[in-house]
Amino acid sequence: MSSPEVTVVGAGVMGLTTAIRLQEAGASVRILTAELTASTTSAAATGMCGPVFAGPNAEWELATVAELRRLEPSHGWVRMETGLGAATSSIGGAPPFADESMYVREATASEVPPGYASGTWMRVPLVDLPPYLDYLVGRFVNGGGTIEQRVVESLAGLDAELVANCTGVGARRLAGDESVRPVKGQHVVVENPGLEGFFLGVTFGPENASWHPYGNHVLLGGVRVEDDWDPAPSPEIARGILQRCIEVEPRLANAKVLAHRAGLRPSRPTVRLEAEIQGSTKIVHNYGHDGTGVLQSWGCAAQATELLLS
Ligand SMILES: Cc1cc2nc3c(=O)[nH]c(=O)nc-3n(C[C@H](O)[C@H](O)[C@H](O)COP(=O)(O)OP(=O)(O)OC[C@H]3O[C@@H](n4cnc5c(N)ncnc54)[C@H](O)[C@@H]3O)c2cc1C
């Protein structure tokens, strides 16, 4: 029997992991993408893959953590990292961890920075996105896949029987789904002044302070700007990020700024992961992962594969 031919639209983390799982299931896969991987939202992400809390998405997230743990011994772009999550007001305890090994302990009062009410030490996989995405592209191409840069105007007009729609925020137009909205995020990349471990400030608002070290550089965040379609880093947002991070960690004050990265999180009330038939085309939609797409990717990729090839 000949292998099924599948077209995946999108070369972010969702398109690449879906394409790889499809290949592993025996499909012959091509990716069509408007932007090459390095210019996607995925390339601008932090890559914090946890903590995984009990809830409806836990199964997808645990699948990703399992794959990252499998890859960790042989790849430098993923490592288990310990860090502090601190909240500005007491939230009466976090939801239960679905992966208990990610919970380290509650922070003592002296470990919680000024302005924060409580904190939890945790240990999660931390992925350096640019080299990780390079690895995914290589794994897909070495598996016989092709990547073609072009804008797709219509999913049903692709002359393909099987299509995976992994277009992130682009699904608003391509799938005609007005519940998809951009939520811009941004990082300032600085030289590491000696930070070990990550910090995630939880403010319950659109701005926070966070840092994630990757050897000699650190990603500083964060921000959520709703309905902003401009993917370019904003100097004003960068100034705010630096100011908030330096307030919590004064060692960042003299850190050399190396780069700025921004991306549009594909926000949607819920992830869309379902099959749809249009004419003779079976489409599986896999988009709308907002700020947890890296964490959910391998689980969603497996489910998209099952839906498409069943
Ligand atoms: C600052 C920031 C920090 C983040 N941190 C984390 C984190 O720590 N952990 C986590 O899990 N997630 C994080 N995220 C969220 C994560 O980045 C996203 O959920 C994820 O990247 C979405 O992946 P995607 O493949 O769906 O979309 P994208 O990466 O946007 O890829 C979409 C692809 O579709 C293509 N496309 C769109 N329309 C068309 C079309 N018409 N024709 C052809 N191609 C098209 C694009 O060119 C692109 O290749 C963060 C995001 C930001 C911005």
Image (cartoon, rainbow, N blue to C red):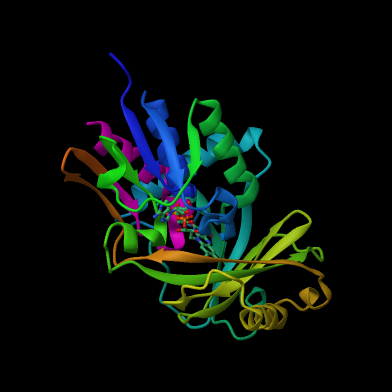
Residue 279 % position (x, y): 15, 42
Residue 174 % position (x, y): 32, 57
Image: 196 above or below 1: below
Q: Quadrant of the N terminus?
A: top left
Label count reads 0
Q: Going 57% across and 82% down the picture, which residue do you hit?
A: 116
- Give the left or right position of residue 14, taking residue 126 as reference: left
Q: Going 33% across and 28% down the picture, which residue do you hit?
A: 5
Image: 192 above or below 254: above
Q: Is residue 309 magenta?
A: yes
Q: Which residue is farthest bottom?
A: 115
User: Which one is in front, 38 or 247?
Assistant: 38
User: For residue 251, which quarter of the picture?
Assistant: bottom right
Q: Is residue 128 visible?
A: no
Image: 267 above or below 104: below
Q: Going 22% across and 39% down the picture, which residue do you hit?
A: 281
Q: Is residue 34 visible?
A: yes
Q: Quadrant of the C terminus?
A: top left
- Give the left or right position of residue 101, taking residue 112 as reference: left
Residue 18 % position (x, y): 40, 40
Image: 166 above or below 220: above
User: Which one is in front, 38 or 289?
Assistant: 38
Q: Is residue 152 magenta?
A: no
User: Which one is in front, 145 or 25?
Assistant: 145
User: For residue 188, which quarter of the picture?
Assistant: bottom right
Residue 76 % position (x, y): 68, 41
Q: Going 47% across and 39% down the picture, which residue do you hit?
A: 66
Q: What residue span does the magenta drawing correspond to? A: 284-310
